[in-house]
């Protein structure tokens, strides 16, 4: 994963991520104390959240978005076979 720090017009920190991964090998983070908004710029993604042993998941395509509430364990990978992708992820 490559993260590049960028800022919006109010100088709020944004992170641009290029994520490529195998969904079966993706580790869950433990959640964080901020909301996370994800916008899919290129490629197809599978965010997973909740209990790592039995996660909830959805399929995101270019132009779609997703919200993760504070404290919720989650991970984000490209969908199997979709190749590289790009998202904008904002924590607030």
Image (cartoon, rainbow, N blue to C red):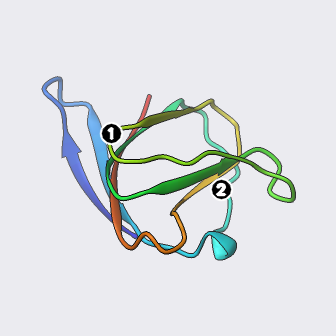
Return the residue at label 2.
29
Residue 71: image location, x then y, percent: 69, 36
Q: Is the residue 26 above or below the residue 92 in the image?
A: below
Answer left or right for 59 relative to 71.
Answer: left
Q: Quadrant of residue 91?
A: top left
- Judge the density around disc 1: few (<14), some (14-19), many (≥20) Cα neighbours within 10 Å: few
Residue at image position (20%, 46%) is 6
Return the residue at label 1.
63
Residue 35: image location, x then y, percent: 53, 29
Q: Secondary structure at mark 2?
A: loop
| Mark closer to the chain start, 1 or 2 | 2
Q: Which mark is residue 73?
A: none
Residue 7: image location, x then y, percent: 19, 39
Answer left or right for 41 relative to 70.
Answer: left
Residue at image position (63%, 31%) is 70
Outermost residue to the left: 9
């Amino acid at each position: 994963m490559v993260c590049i720090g960028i800022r919006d017009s109010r100088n709020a920190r944004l992170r641009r991520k290029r994520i490529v991964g195998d969904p079966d090998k993706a580790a869950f983070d433990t959640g964080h104390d901020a909301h996370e908004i994800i916008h899919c710029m290129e490629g197809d993604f599978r965010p997973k959240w909740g209990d790592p042993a039995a996660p909830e998941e959805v399929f995101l395509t270019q132009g779609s978005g997703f919200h993760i509430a504070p404290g919720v364990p989650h991970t984000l990978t490209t969908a199997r076979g979709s190749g590289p992708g790009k998202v904008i992820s904002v924590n607030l």
